[in-house]
Image (spheres, rainbow, N blue to C red):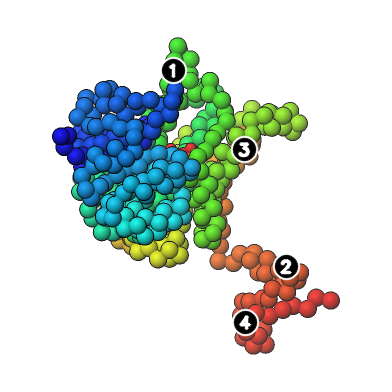
Amino acid sequence: MTKKASWGILGMGVMGTSLSRNLAQKGLSLALYNRYLKGEEEGVAAERCQTYPELETAQPFEELAAFVGALESPRKILVMVPSGPAIESVLEQLLTLLAPGDILIDGGNSHFEATEKRDERFTAAGISFLGMGVSGGEEGALKGPALMVGGHAEAFGRVQKDLAQMAAKNSQGVPCLGYFGRGGAGHYVKMVHNGVEYAEMQLLAEVYECLLTQENPSWNLFAEWQQTESQSYLLGITASIVTYRENEALVIEQILDKTRHKGTGSWSSTSAIAQGAPATLMQAALNARFTASQKEYRSKMAAELTTINTKPPVLREITLKKAYDLVRWVNHHQGFELLKAAKTTHAWSFPLSEAAKSWTAGCIIQSELMQELTDLLEENQNLLESSRFKKCHQENRTALEELLTWGLKAKIPLPAFSAAWHYLMAISQADSSGNFIQAQRDFFGGHGLEWKNPKSNKGKHGPWHTKHS
Ligand code: 6PG
């Protein structure tokens, strides 16, 4: 009789296959499942076992009950299928096949509220449900991803050792594996990771567009920056992307300028709105994707709203780099502030440094800056109030302003860089125009006024109304 497997991996797409290979390389015995879809998906799990030597001893299935039956009890199953209807249907079937004590992990990019509902449903059946954000793409999944887990603490304890083996290790050898609390906490942290990721990607896209305007742009610039404190995974891939050629032609120049997205960036932006947390960079990045997707309309409007095209002025590389270094701090600060607000709303108690630590390797937003932020957050410092940020701000603010001024002259949209500047201006303004908004709301809606100084206003306390005649 075949020995039962210690883990079941469900879904043999890119991520499911890479995570299976990762676990198999650590010596864990596996059962692999992929659905059977006549003419489309046939014998997929078996094919994976034949293709990858490390999966040679794994057991392949395309019948769900047989797959579940091949696992040691209590079972441990990692589900790697796309969020939405695909996962909903497979979870529904699993609910009828699993037994109390089993552990089910959703490793896809599910919305945290869906995870909370599933957690309740499975808990009622005695099954432990964990929602786990997995970051790092195909390579990360194979060599070590960042893992962000939420759900039953006791169940996490039972799989922690195996997950730690699977996860990336940072420069201190610490696994990039965080447990963030009950319900959808893990998927929430992954969602914010992706919001920060959207803005980091957009900033690099803006740098790319700035460089494109220059005569003989130096495409080695990204590789040079990568050798400095600006280092990051995304900067590293940018250095390759801008110089990559096929048949001697630059591939980047042949890619259609139309952007897609799968949801996590808009979920994090929506959640920031729900929390009342300013997350202006991730929202600017999201809107930039929306406008980029409107290729046909943009092409039409390019002819309708013609601007006088003057030759873009020269832009100093150092200006670009200094501005870039500054705005990344603002993006990360907004991401951590969003996490802080959500922690209060959802009564999660994880330290922010735990999120930062889980993002120091394996994931898309890993960077030298993230390591630095982890240290600051471990000391409970507010990022913008830290002396490190103040130094960065003092050294680079003028460059950011020079870049934005250049952008106006060159007629280049810089939504994420501008969002960072506006945020910095607004958050460091002791007296804002908020009084004016109050006055307007009270004028047309009788919403009441809060007085700046009740004593000098004849002792009027609390909400008060103006009487315009
Ligand atoms: C990661 C990525 C990964 C994926 C997202 C983003 O952390 O490994 O974020 O999860 O690339 O789905 O996708 P979109 O850009 O399509 O929204």
State ligand 1's quadrant: top left
Circle 3 residue: 291
Circle 2 residue: 440
- Nearest to viewer (mark 3 / mark 1): 3
Q: Amino acid at mark 1?
A: Arg
Check mark 4 vs ligand 1: CB closer than 8 Å? yes or no.
no
Q: Amino acid at mark 4?
A: Gly
- Nearest to viewer (mark 4 / mark 3): 3
Q: Are marks 4 and 3 in contact (CB under 8 Å)?
A: no
Q: Give the residue furthest to the top.
A: 247
Using the image as rendered, state which of residue 21 and residue 451 is in the foreground. 21
- From mark 4 to mark 2, how far is it between C-alphas? 17 Å
- Residue drawn at (39%, 45%), measured in percent from left and top? 93
Q: Quadrant of residue 353?
A: bottom left
Circle 1 residue: 245
N-term-proximal mark, 3 vs 2:
3
